[in-house]
Image: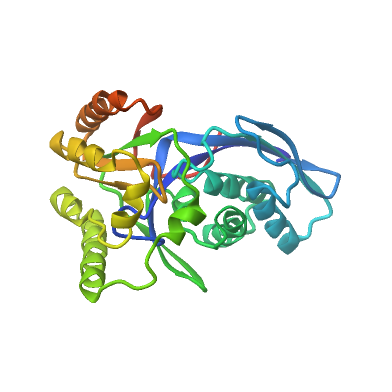
Amino acid sequence: MKELKIFSPATVANVSCGFDVLGFCLDSIGDEMVVRKTDKKGIHITKITGYDLPFDPEKNVAGVSALALLKDVQPDFGFEIEIYKKIKPGSGVGSSAASAVGSVFAMNEILGRPYNRTELTNFAMKGEALASKSEHADNIAPAIFGGFTLVKSVAPLDILQLPTPNDLWAVIIHPQIEIKTAEARAILPKNIPLKDAITQWSNVGSLVHALHSNDYDLLSKSLTDVVVEPHRSKLIPHFDLIRETVLKHGALGCGISGSGPSIFSLSHGHKKAQNVAEAIQNVFVKTNIPFEIYISKINTQGIKIL
């Protein structure tokens, strides 16, 4: 195999209560990449469409993760990468993670799969760090493993793959404003009250149990963030209005996707998700802020070959 085309999916990180550890994978939004083996050594980004991103592999998220893998495997050949960028950078649905994951997944396939998914996550984290200034895997892990994932530890890296209820759908609204991850991290408190910490880890535990037991009611009760959302929601116009709207129209819960500005909600069944999306559309169209809405089943496969 000398050339591959892949779909690298968008993801939702944090999932309300699981800051920096929980994430899930989307199905209807993602980047495409073509990666090919070349006689010329090194990593060469030859084409980028969609957004203005650097061709220098050391300044491009996909390039940095690819270089990390290449340094480890040390082949006597190189790789060319074409990036068809469809996830807007800074959208809050794992744009940088999709780039970081796409290059290493395709290279690993061409090389005959010498690395497992956890090792690929480790390489991809090097690229993610270029974008967010820290190595974290809450978007990368669900993109590689699919479904819901929990990052138990970063050093050493330990990813837990969680079950996905079989009729769970996500609705994403992406207001066309930019929130930089570094800025969204800077506003978070260094210390939190013990009672908030107790509430938060209780919600994480019950959310994980809800996924294992297919319990939609418990899932709904668990999607509460008392640590991060009270601070970050101030950066997102009309966040409270969106939350009120989706809950009124039957969503299980709602929260900030990653560091924002995208907002996710989860629904039991496609019809409910459609109702939620329509309600958001009707409310947000009055705000004069451009936006996009996506409906997606939870993607349990993750990144895939096209």
**90 to the left or right of 148:** right
Residue at point 58%, 34% (across, down): 85
> What quarter of the picture does the C terminus occupy?
top right
Q: Quadrant of residue 203?
A: bottom left
Residue at 21% over, 35% down? 269
> Taking 294 as reference, is 306 left or right?
right
Total number of numbered discs in the rendering? 0
Q: Residue at x 55, y 62 (%)?
A: 134
Residue at image coords 33%, 49%: 234
Q: Position of residue 152 (x, y in %)?
A: 40, 68
The type of colouring in the image is rainbow
User: In which quarter of the view is residue 238 placed?
Assistant: top left
Residue 162 appears in the figure:
yes
User: Which quadrant is home to the N terminus?
Assistant: top right
**Residue occupying the far bottom of the picture:** 194
Residue 140 visible, this orientation? no
Residue 177 x/y as whole percent: 45, 37
Percent position of residue 25, x then y? 41, 45
| Place of residue 225 in the rendered image (x, y in percent of width and height, measured from the top left) | 26, 57
Q: From the viewer's perspective, is 133 left or right of 244? A: right
